Image (cartoon, rainbow, N blue to C red):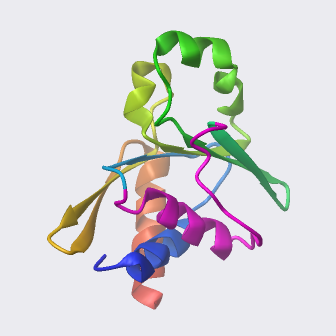
Amino acid sequence: MPDADATVRVGRALAAGIAPGRVLHLSGDLGTGKTTLVRGLLRSLGVTGPIKSPSYAWVEPYTISSLDLYHFDFYRIGDRNAWLSSGLREYFRPDAVCIVEWPERAGDLLPSPDLAATLRYDGTARRAQLQARSAAGDDWLASLRQALASF
């Protein structure tokens, strides 16, 4: 992923594997493209209008056809008690897709992801390492590879 456009393309490719119940964790330093990747994914799914990082609200909900997709940003979560009292656990349902930026801030309170992505800078280029962590994640990663091959 040499630049922001490539990050958007990866997000678009990830959209090909979206299915209810899937969880994606996005880790990486500030500015490595987590929200840019989500923006590409959401645009590919037909979301119009502004797509912002939910760092102050913690969650941005999107309804895409009959699919509920929740974009979380836990950068500002202060401690376990904030997570536990927030009610955010209720969003992680079998019929919803959850994409979490900064999952490490909530620690072991989050459900395990199907797919985990770590974004980082490598000089002036961006790099993404994706790892499947479930059978659904294996399927998602396979659909990502297939979608990227078609771009």
- The extreme right residue here reads 66
Q: Quadrant of residue 138?
A: bottom left
Who is closer to the viewer here, 64 or 55?
55
Q: Is residue 124 left or right of residue 69?
A: left
Q: Which residue lies at the image location 37% right of the left edge and 59% below the top edge?
A: 31
Seen in the picture, residue 63 relative to 58 is either above or below; the reply is: below
Task: Tell me residue 80's x, y (percent).
Answer: 48, 13
- Residue 53 shown in magenta: yes
Task: Tell me residue 9's x, y (percent).
Answer: 47, 79
Q: Is residue 53 left or right of residue 28?
A: right
- Residue 8 shown in magenta: no
Q: How many marks?
A: 0
Q: Quadrant of residue 144?
A: bottom left
- The extreme bottom residue here reads 151
Seen in the picture, residue 79 relative to 138 is either above or below; the reply is: above
- The extreme left residue here reads 123
Seen in the picture, residue 30 relative to 57 is either above or below; the reply is: below
Give the residues drawn in magenta, as a range.
31-57
Q: Is residue 139 visible?
A: yes
Q: Which image quadrant: the N terminus?
A: bottom left
Task: Tell me residue 27's x, y (percent).
Answer: 36, 46
Q: Quadrant of residue 58?
A: top right
Q: Which residue lies at the image location 58% right of the left edge and 46% below the top edge?
A: 22
Q: Is residue 16 visible?
A: no
Q: Is residue 100 left or right of residue 95?
A: left
Task: Tell me residue 37's x, y (percent).
Answer: 48, 65
Q: Which residue lies at the image location 45% right of the left edge and 32% below the top edge?
A: 112
